[in-house]
Image (cartoon, rainbow, N blue to C red):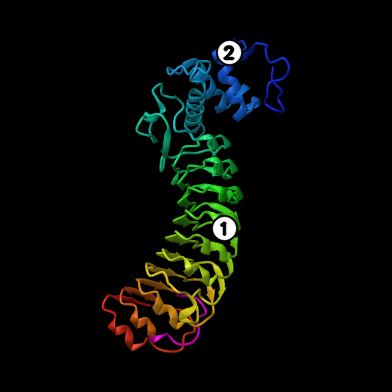
Amino acid sequence: GYSSKSGMLSIDHCDSIEICGNNAAAGSRERDIFDKLVKISGIERLMDPHTEEYQAACWIINADNDRIELSDTAHELNYDVLLQRYIVALIYLKTKVTDVLRSDQECFWEGIYCNEDNVTVNKIDLAGKGLTGTLFHELGELKFLQVLNLEENKLGGEIPLEVANMWSLEELYIGDNNFEGTIPTEMGQMNSLTVLDVHTNSLSGTVPLNIYNISTLKYLNMTRNFFEGTISSNVAHLVLLEKLDLSFNFFTGVVPVDVLRISRLKELILQSNEFTGSIPLPKKSTYFQDYPKQLTRLIFGDNKFESSIPNTIEKLSGLKEIRIDNNRLTGVIPTQLGRLKQLTMLSLSYNELKSSIPSELKNLKKLSRVY
């Protein structure tokens, strides 16, 4: 039998138990499979005929043409194959991709992609498939998954902390869903992650400090949620970051100027928050040895910035788009803006700036929109 509290075998583990309508003796294929799955899903879910865990397990035991065996010499390999097939089946059942599982290898299922040998799932792309339901902790067992794209669906609930166990994951897209709750602190341990995209959900709370430890991040998109709190100066640790989008949230406080230490930064989008103080540009040009010359978009509109525009903005020589409208900027419009030769759009409206537009802007041949 099993202990329902621990999900582990009790002293009388040699007894036969009923699995999927059949008696399964200790050492049988059915019992071996069941014993392995209990370790990750628990006894209650696997014994309840109304759960997706039960349906997936019974499909593998009774109807799966692959006939996974765990008692042969390839035990370790087959255990990985079992977990992968079970978890992919759970994805399909729990998110309502289908009610009927296919009998062929999961690498050939819709939205499932494998390595060249068609053995290991390394990408799941089910974006825009109308998925419902929630994510589940068993996903963390997909140790070799590199890309998980579930954006533009109707998934909800909280992000399970076990997602952080996918240590090979490089790209995570779960934007445009109905997720709520906070970003698990454990995600700061995902040392292979290059893309974290959680835009357009109902996520809240602060950005965990551990997120700034993911030095591999290139793309961080948290727009259109309910995040709050401040941006830590540790953001400068994201040395490979190319795009940071925190727009349309409830962030507050001063934006650390250290964000411009990220030399590869191309887009800095902070509009529609509650940021205050100076815009994140140093007063002295010697503050940084190198400025992010690849930075093309500086989007700070709809905040409460109340400084003047520092002359050092000329150091951001790659800027194409500047939007600092609807703030509380004071002082004069710096003539140094006329040195930004790549500038195509400038929006400074709805501030408290004193002077008119500098004549130096006439030298900007690419500038077509000024507000």
Residue 21: image tag: 2
Q: In front here: 72 or 45? A: 72
Q: Amino acid at mark 1?
A: Phe
| Residues rendered magenta in the picture | 324-335
Q: Horizontally, is 344 left or right of 350 in the view?
A: left
Q: Who's the residue at 40% across and 64% down the image?
A: 266
* Label 2 secondary element: loop
Of the numbered discs 1 and 2, the one sitting upstream in the chain is 2
For residue 48, which numbered disc appears in the image?
A: none
Q: Which mark is residue 226?
A: 1
When the figure is inspected, residue 53 is found, relative to residue 313, above or below; the finding is: above
Image check: 229 left or right of 60? right
Q: Visible in this render: residue 289?
A: yes
Q: Amino acid at mark 2?
A: Gly
128 to 254, vertically: above or below: above
Mark 1 Cα shell of 10 Å, populated few (<14), some (14-19), many (≥20): many
Is residue 188 within the magenta segment? no
Q: Secondary structure at mark 1?
A: strand
Q: Which residue is at 58% across, 64% downward?
A: 232
Q: Position of residue 249 (x, y in %)?
A: 54, 61
The image quarter containing residue 365 is: bottom left
Q: Is residue 329 magenta?
A: yes
